[in-house]
Amino acid sequence: MNAHVFTSDVAFTPTVKAIQARKGSRDAYARVEERGGWQADITPDLAAFIEAQTSIFLSTANGDGQPYIQHRGGPAGFLKVLDERTIGFTDFSGNRQFITQGNLDDNPRAFMFLIDYAHRQRIKIWGSARVVEDDADLMAKLMPEGYKARPEQIILFTVSAWDSNCPQHIPQRFEAADVAAALAERDNRIERLEQEIARLRGASSAKE
């Protein structure tokens, strides 16, 4: 049975709530709880945000509570929303330390942090995760087409709660490919304008 009264209780423990009360923010968060707390289902907007990401951070903790954060990346779409509570992705072969997998064997609780620097938006997702090995059909479904990486296994993340943060203090950064595309468009426009100027100058000279 879920011991949490509100979805946000996954993060707002009694100790956290006591600190919020002491520092003056408890009333505001209590009103959020009265409206139902954070969402647990993956909405269409959240699904679109998830599947647009190329870089995420996955947090786990071992049986002793020692936390660990692992970066995971891939082309847009490497994260796939499988249903209203499940996110799946291919775990590509890396340094083969298998810390995340070992932690999940001992403690399935996990946390996913997604940040879009260009739009200064971040999403926090609490839940649990498990590693799936030797499932060829699911691997074929989740492996990004044409991506040159060796698939090791699959990670399935079950969402229990999620929340979005305000953009405060998020530096605005842009993907190199997006910057390159914008510069290429600028250079093409400059070239077209220069050609038009040259044409107009030629037409003006012909009339003299």
Image: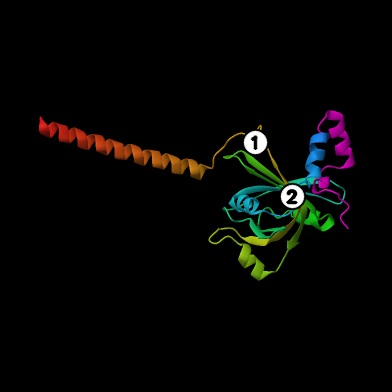
Residue 110 is one of the magenta-drawn residues: no
Residue 10: image location, x then y, percent: 82, 47
Quarter placement of the N terminus: bottom right
Classify residue 123 by image quadrant: top right
Disc with the residue nearer the chain's start (1 vs 2): 2
Alpha carbon of mark 1 to alpha carbon of mark 2: how far? 19 Å
Sort mark 1 into few (<14), some (14-19) or many (20+) by Cα contacts within 10 Å.
some
Residue with the mark numbered 1? 167
The residue under the point 55% across, 62% down is 145
What x and y, as percent, mark residue 114?
66, 46
Callout 1 amino acid: Pro
176 lies left or right of 129: left
Amino acid on which disc 2 is placed: Gln
Residue in the picture at 61% in, 62% down: 143
Where's residue 56, x and y in %? 66, 48
**Badge number at residue 79:** none
Q: Is residue 69 above or below residue 77?
A: above
Crowding at label 2, few (<14), some or many (≥20) Cα neighbours within 10 Å? some
Could you say which quadrant of the image residue 32 lies in? Answer: top right
Q: Is residue 12 visible?
A: yes
- Front-most of residues 150 and 109: 109
Residue 92 visible to an observer of this rendering: no
Q: Going by the picture, which residue comes out furthest to the left? A: 208
Stretch in magenta: 1-26
Give residue 39's mark: 2
Q: Are marks 1 and 2 in contact (CB under 8 Å)?
A: no
Q: Position of residue 71 (x, y in %)?
A: 68, 48
In this rendering, position of residue 99 left or right of residue 200: right
The residue under the point 60% across, 52% down is 48
Q: Mark 2 falls on what kind of element?
A: loop
